[in-house]
Amino acid sequence: MNREEGLDLILRIEKNINGILIGKEDVVRLTLTGIIAGGHILIEDTPGTGKTLMAKLIAASIKGDFSRIQFTPDLLPADITGLNIYNRSKSEFEFVRGPVFTNILLADEINRATPRTQSALLESMEERQVTIDGRTYTLSEPFVVLATENPVETAGTFPLPEAQLDRFIMHLSMGSLSPADEVLMLNTIEEQGKADGVTAVCDLEDIVKIRELAHEVYMHDDLKEYLVTIVQKTRDNVKVHMGVSPRGTLWLMRAARAYAFIMGRDHVLPDDIKYLAPFVLSHRIMAYTGSDIATKRSIVSEVLSSVEVPSEDWSRR
């Protein structure tokens, strides 16, 4: 697969999703950027905004397996990863795989579960594997967690720990529909149905190949220094008591390359980094001034405005 073929597949996936999920083009593109970069996505929003539908549409478009876990306070780690069950007829234990063994995993209302259960996803998200009773099972690629989260002020929630937040490449919000888009949504659902009628435009191997192509997108050394300066300033900011980790630096670079690829370029621009930084960095910050995502994004915006944007011929190697 060459770059043009990969880009054509991405555009077809976008068209597939946007034909049913109305008015969410930016969120869809950011989500695909995160997937092509090899990351997981955290979506914080109210119920009924299309989070589950988007996850199903993505899975259907790439011929991927889809699993959904409804996180609740009584959910156990074994309900996610699976467990060994004794088989009397064979006189041995057999491993029964949990819903984490899939390609697109919708972790619905992830902050409804206890921290112990939330942590059951840590190994699978970072290392793409699950360890049960000393035995390690490798997850298939691609493996993507699309987690939804209730607003932190909602009763009965457990805020995600920093270690878990840091494993999500982006923190997004579906946002609300305009009146015109909401009318279009009603007509679309009546005429076309939902995810069940979506035709796959590629397979899982194609996504893996597209990831490899995106990894080859050129990023000038000056842009890497620009990116690192932004991250360093989140650590030095007086409003912050814990800035972005080195993992966040790496994810921002990967996201910038994936976004440039989706935009049809073979090189990263400063605008790619500036556009993606609030989505990639904000949830990794612990601020003195508040824990809500809007406050953290305002800090990232301040940092971006304080860092001089380098000028260069970014396509030159």
Image: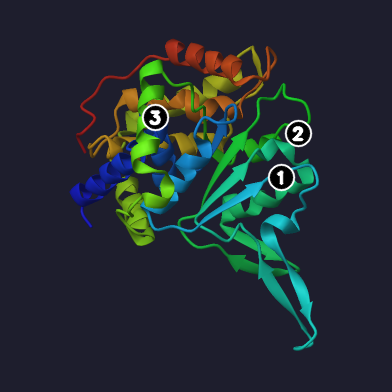
Name the quadrant containing residue 130: bottom right
- 192 to the left or right of 165: left
Q: Nearer the viewer, residue 78 or 267?
A: 78
Q: Nearer the viewer, residue 316 or 122?
A: 122
Q: Nearer the viewer, mark 1 or mark 3?
A: 3
Contact check, label 2 and label 3, Cβ < 8 Å: no
- Secondary structure under badge 1? helix
Report the colour scheme.
rainbow
Would you place residue 49 above or below residue 212 in this image?
Answer: above
Q: Is residue 38 visible?
A: no
Of the image marks 2 and 3, the number of the one nearer the N terminus: 2
Type of amino acid at the residue the image marks with label 2: Phe
Q: Residues within 10 Å of mark 1 (few under 14, many from 20)?
A: many
- Secondary structure under badge 3? helix
Disc 2 to disc 3, C-alpha distance: 33 Å
* Image position, residue 158 (x, y; %): 76, 33
The residue that mark 1 highlights is 118
Q: Residue at x 68, y 15 (%)?
A: 290
Would you place residue 141 above or below residue 236 in this image?
Answer: below
Would you place residue 273 above or below residue 142 in this image?
Answer: above
The residue that mark 3 highlights is 185
- Which label sits on residue 110? none
The residue that mark 2 highlights is 158
Q: Residues within 10 Å of mark 2 (few under 14, many from 20)?
A: some
- Secondary structure under badge 2? loop
